[in-house]
Image: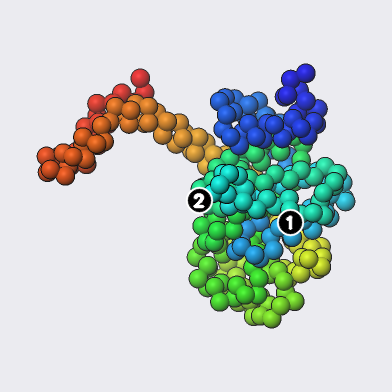
Amino acid sequence: MTILDRFFKGDVRALSRLISFVENQAPDYQKLLARLYPRSGRAYRIGFTGPPGSGKSTLVDKLTSKLSKEGNKIGIIAVDPTSPFTGGALLGDRIRMQNLAGAKDVYIRSMASRGSFGGLAATTKEVALVLDAFGKDFVIIETVGVGQVELDVANTCDTTVVVFVPESGDSVQAMKAGLMEIADIFVVNKTDREGAKRIISELESILELRREKDGWEFPVVATVAINDVGIEELWSKISDHQEFMSENGILQQKRKNQVKIELKEIIENKMKKILEKKVFSGLNLEEIAERVLKGEDDPYSAGERFLDQADLFD
């Protein structure tokens, strides 16, 4: 029996091996994804992002426990900073999700960001596809928590949850133009701390205009995840958002946009490889740099010359 046969029969070890194959971008990994693609599209993707230390892992832990007890199959992708020594995930989220150890039909994968921007690892979308094809009902993605630039999660997930803590209050306005605009649901976690009411009030004020414009309520959910406070309400709002998008045709359009973005990225990566092979391999950067410094050439003209000479699609 091949590893793919075992995967289709629900073998978790086969799942782990295929994820490693994809994550490491092994030769022909895209051909594997092409085999899996027809079996994907059923899982609902939920993204959790927000500043480091806001309790995202605990929220994911508690929410997953609830979904698992209700008979759902869940895959978790936890993106962490890269270790400068091993190149792997610096703080594997499995450590912070001890409650899920041994939970039925829950699979957790820690991925290293490996220098990727946007809060996700380079192959997060592809790993999510593998989990989807494996038969997961939900794929939950927790980002590395790098700040305002985590736009990738909104382009990957169906529902995006942004998590704050009371101490985030002073920075909400600063994040308004970035992190604030990707969220479908806002969570203020650790609301047993001082300042919780203030940040909730700030968020409600900021969201008034957006609610009128988009038609969705953009709820602000207060939680104390470590004590299971607010988890039921959070799940209720996620379910409401899924229903809202399905009823208004937004979910289908969103997934179409996700496919378009993915297709564009695939083409861009292919073009980059073509450029590296056809242009950069024959480009003597050292010689050109010397000529430019001597005033005998300029980088713009040199670039144009090489592009004109290179037969990119030969």
Quarter of the figure with residue 1: top right
- Residue 272 shown left or right of residue 149 in the figure: left
Q: Is residue 116 above or below residue 265?
A: below
Q: Is residue 90 above or below residue 107?
A: below
Q: Who is closer to the viewer here, 37 or 17?
A: 17
Q: Is residue 265 above or below residue 78?
A: above
- Residue 266 shown left or right of residue 234 in the figure: left
Closest to the camera, between mark 2 and mark 1, is: 1
Q: CA distance from mark 2 to mark 1?
A: 23 Å
Name the residue type under label 2: Phe
User: SS of the residue at dot 2?
Assistant: loop
Q: Write the residue at 58% across / 52% down.
A: 81
Quarter of the figure with residue 50: bottom right
Name the residue type under label 1: Arg
Give the mark nearer the N terminus: 2 vs 1. 1
Residue 164 seen anywhere in this rendered image of the structure: yes
Residue that carries the numbered disc 2 in the rendered image: 117
Q: Write the residue at 52% across / 67% down.
A: 175
Could you tell me residue 131's position as x and y percent? 71, 38
User: SS of the residue at dot 1?
Assistant: loop
Q: Residues within 10 Å of mark 2 (few under 14, many from 20)?
A: some
Q: Write the residue at 48% across / 38% down.
A: 264
Could you tell me residue 32's position as x and y percent? 63, 26
Q: Write the residue at 29% across / 27% down.
A: 282
Residue that carries the numbered disc 1 in the rendered image: 96
Q: Who is closer to the viewer here, 235 or 60?
A: 60
